[in-house]
Amino acid sequence: MKAKLMDFDKALELFEPVLGFEVHVELGTSTKMFSAAPNPAHPEFHGAEPNTLIDPLSLGLPGSLPVTNETAVRYSISLGLALGCQIATSCRFARKNYFYPDTPKNYQISQYDEPIAFEGAVEIELASGRQVTVPIERAHMEEDAGKLTHVGGSTGRIQGAEYSLVDYNRAGVPLVEIVTHMIFGAEHDAPELARAYVGAIRDIVLSLGISEARMERGNLRCDANVSLRPRGSQQLGTRTETKNVNSMRSVERAVRYEIQRQAAILADGGTITQETRHWHEDTGETSPGRPKSDADDYRYFPEPDLLPVEPSRELVEELRAALPEQPVARKRRLKAEWGFSDLEFQDVVNGDMLHVVEATVAAGAAPQSARKWWTGEIARVANERGVEAASLVEPAHVAELQRLIDERTLSDRLARQALEGVMAGEGSPAEVAEARGLKVVTDESALVAAVDEALAAQPDVLAKIRDGKVQAAGAVIGAVMKAMRGQADAARVREIVLERAAG
């Protein structure tokens, strides 16, 4: 049964939204958080056979003991500093106890009352130019769980499945969980703020080089907390937590949906259930998960097999000195460097493409060319497929595609066909162009022959051009391009036509 929704503007007239976010970042270390089991970078990770990136600790075997990953600690401190947090002089790990098949020890090693980083803030800028400070409560280290695959049902969830498979490859992968304080005052900007905040976290993580931060691959996951309280009330409403939303667009949509859903329930005199909820990309809805557990339910206690982490002040200052610029400052710098207009730059930001455009420029493409591809053809395909644009093609391949155009190896039309092949997994742009026979015809004699043939079929074109109607050349150019299956150099064809008219 579809939930009743209230109009968004009406919901904001009646209620004040209060937000909170928990963002999980997988760290790109070579080994897992507490063991020497491999933690290879994507996409190799996804190509590994199930239950091969494991060791006794990953499986929770008796007698296996954890050892803290030093690189993961350094990455976590860097992230904490980039979030404006204080870094603990001493912190410890705890056992978070719960049973689930993908948690083989029946507990997760995490941090509870002593996180590595605490009390920070992230500045974000919305499309309107409004700047918002998101308060950070903590950033703590922990290990990831394994992965369950439910087989036989129609939804991919456990309900209706015939059986479930467990893959422990991900068990023990290092994570940092970033938890905000409650966020007040978002008002109508609440959905956009959610998207912008997660985008800022992703930008920080990428600039630090500590994770690929690919949401569609699970490198970065967001749990969005939403509650409503009546206008003028100081009492907080009951929150829901929408789990593991896997794209920027979905984070924005999920927050908007929960505001509308909760407002409709409260306006009808109902109550909100404190629970986790699942986001459904296909329907744009959330559905109930399980009642939300409080900290007491997990029976936290100190991890007896691990020593406290006590980073030296020298290490903290070394990592602080290496921090990249903050997201807001970075956006302003890139806009100036690229020479984009306000509208052009906002198109890139709204499409969550700042990092891929930047990477494409770094790979050798001109800024305007990079923007054209990502906000044009790639964005169109991404919208059609309902996926993130960054998941379709690598920035280096986009830069290579533009280089082939600049070298006049491909025309714009042929480049779009090559891009289609790249997105289908057929290889690099050059490899696709070679395999599909897409290269521009540069044989001058072939071009001249094709032009003469087209002019013979349209004898009045030359007279029109001589009378000053240069646009008449378009008909001949079109005929030549069609005859040569789009592989002629249109600019050179035009030159030949005008040469014939002048001669």
Image (spheres, helix red, strand yellow):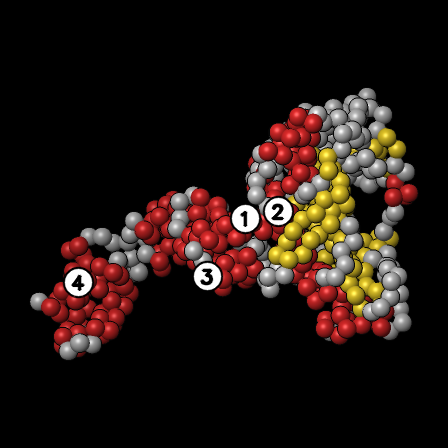
Q: Quadrant of residue 250?
A: bottom right
Q: Is residue 177 above or below residue 419?
A: above
Q: Amino acid at mark 2?
A: Arg
Q: Is the N terminus in the top left, top right, bottom left or bottom right quadrant? A: bottom right
Give the Cα distance between marks 1 and 4: 47 Å
Q: Which label's residue is closer to the chain start, 2 or 4?
A: 2
Mark 2–mark 4 contact, CB under 8 Å?
no
What residue is pinned by disc 2?
202
SS at mark 1 in the image: helix
Give the Cα distance between marks 1 and 3: 16 Å
What residue is pinned by disc 1?
330
Give the Cα distance between marks 3 and 2: 24 Å
Q: Which label's residue is closer to the chain start, 2 or 1?
A: 2
Give the Cα distance between marks 3 and 4: 36 Å
- For residue 496, the mark is 4
- For residue 341, the mark is 3
Give the Cα distance between marks 2 and 4: 50 Å
Residue plotted at (61% across, 44% down) = 204
- Observer-side mark, 2 or 4, equals 2
Horizontal placement of 123 versus 348: left or right?
right
Give the Cα distance between marks 2 and 1: 13 Å
Q: Nearer the viewer, residue 46 or 196?
A: 196
Q: Amino acid at mark 1?
A: Arg
Q: Quadrant of residue 387?
A: bottom right
- Observer-side mark, 2 or 1, equals 1
Q: Nearer the viewer, residue 501 or 37?
A: 501
